[in-house]
Structure formats: structure tokens, C-alpha cells
Amino acid sequence: MRIYEGSPRQDFEEVLRSMGAYADDAGMREILILEIPDGFILQGLQVQASEGAWRDAMGRQAKETLRIGDDELSRFMDDGLARRGSGPGRTDGTPGYYERALRVIGRYIDEQSPRDVFLLEQDGAFVLRLLLAHQAGDRHAIVEFTKDDVEQRVAQGPSLREPQTGRVARTNGAQPQP
């Protein structure tokens, strides 16, 4: 499932936002997202309950790996839409860290129109490897978003929304590189 070869409903902003919401809800940390031909791989560290020795009373971290195909991705996106607006959401009504961060990173990715995406996060900083088409052939580009870059883009988000729809307006102008 390559995003730009799929249905028009899908874009990286919404897809990554919905996977970010899942990661937030699952308590994942230090995530990795890899686009594969039929979906995505989402991997992260997750605290799992433990009934072992006293040092494990709080639980322990284990690596969780999910293969997210078309059906699961559609469900993630539907769940994300239901949480927003009038739908049931988190108790405080605000999206979690990964949902916010991956939405703005997804917007950046949409502006690049890559053929393939690999994303790695550690301590709030994100590294992307994008396969981009060029006249001389495809080539990979590496992009880094520091935690401050992500927070700045999240803060700018409301100013980019269209007033009537609440949707994010797409721009054709030059975008600053992170």
C-alpha cells in the first residue's frame, strides 16, 4: 500500500496522526514507522504489567511490533476521526504527543510526495528517510526534526487551518527545511 497509489482518502498527515494516536493510547515510546507495500510497521517500547519480582512491580518495557494493513489503518483513521470534534475523546480532550507530532510531520511528508517513508523517533526527535523521485532517478533524503522543531510546527498548526472547514490549507510556496 503505497500512500500515493492508494485511495484519495489517505495522506500521510492523517495516516501518521492516527498511528500516533494509537501509539499514545498504547503507551508506546521511541517509535519506528516503516512503510511497506501493503501497509506499515509500527514498533515501539511499551510498558507491560509484570507479576514477577519486586523490581518488576511497576512493569517492564518490551518492544511491541505491529503490522498495520489496509483494514487496520482504515480502522485507526476512523477511530481518530471519531475522537475529534463531538466524538468521544481522551478525558481532557487533547491529543497525545505522538498524535500531534506525527500530524505535523505527516504534513511535511505530504509536501514532499515521497515514494517510501521510514521514520525513527527517540527522546522526542524524529529522523525521516524519504525516497524521493528526481529527474536523475530516485534517491533517499534524510530529514531531522528536533523536539523544538516539532513543538514549533504544532504551535503553527492552527494558523494554517482554513477558517470555514478547520482543515489544514495546503501551500505551494517554499517550505523551510527542518
Image (spheres, grey):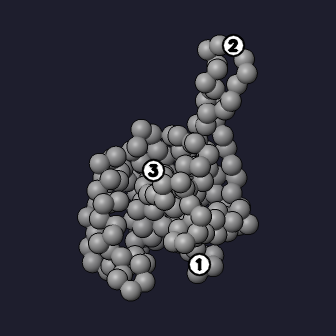
Q: Report how far apart the C-alphas of labels 3 and 1 lie in the structure.
A: 24 Å
Residue shown at 33% from the left, 79% from the top: 171
Q: Quadrant of the N terminus?
A: bottom right
The image shows residue 41 at horizontal and vertical percentages of 64, 52
Q: Position of residue 116 (x, y in %)?
A: 54, 62
Residue drawn 41% across the image and 78% down it: 166
Mark linked to residue 9: 1
User: Seen in the image, is 33 located left or right of residue 101?
Assistant: right
Q: Residue furthest bottom?
A: 164
Mark 1 and mark 2: Cα distance apart in space: 48 Å
Q: Please tell me whether residue 31 is drawn above or below residue 106 in the rendered image.
A: above
**Label 1 vs 2, first from the N-terminus:** 1
* Helix, strand or loop for disc 2: loop
- The amino acid type found where label 3 is placed reads Tyr
Q: Which residue is mark 3?
A: 97
Residue 57: x, y in percent?
64, 20
Question: Which amino acid does the dot numbered 1 rest on?
Answer: Arg
Tell me the distance, in whole angstroms, between the alpha carbons under discs 3 and 2: 32 Å
Per the image, the residue denoted by label 2 is 53
Which one is earlier in the sequence, the residue at label 3 or at label 2? 2
Query: Which quadrant of the structure image shows residue 135?
Result: bottom left
Q: Are marks 1 and 2 in contact (CB under 8 Å)?
A: no
Rendered view: 50 above or below 5? above
Instruction: Give me the residue at 40% from left, 53% from top.
Output: 142
User: Could you tell me which quadrant the C terminus lies in?
Assistant: bottom left
Label 1 crowd bin: few (<14), some (14–19), many (20+), radius 10 Å: few
Mark 2 is on which residue type? Ala
Q: Are marks 3 and 1 in contact (CB under 8 Å)?
A: no
> Is residue 159 shown above or below 18?
below
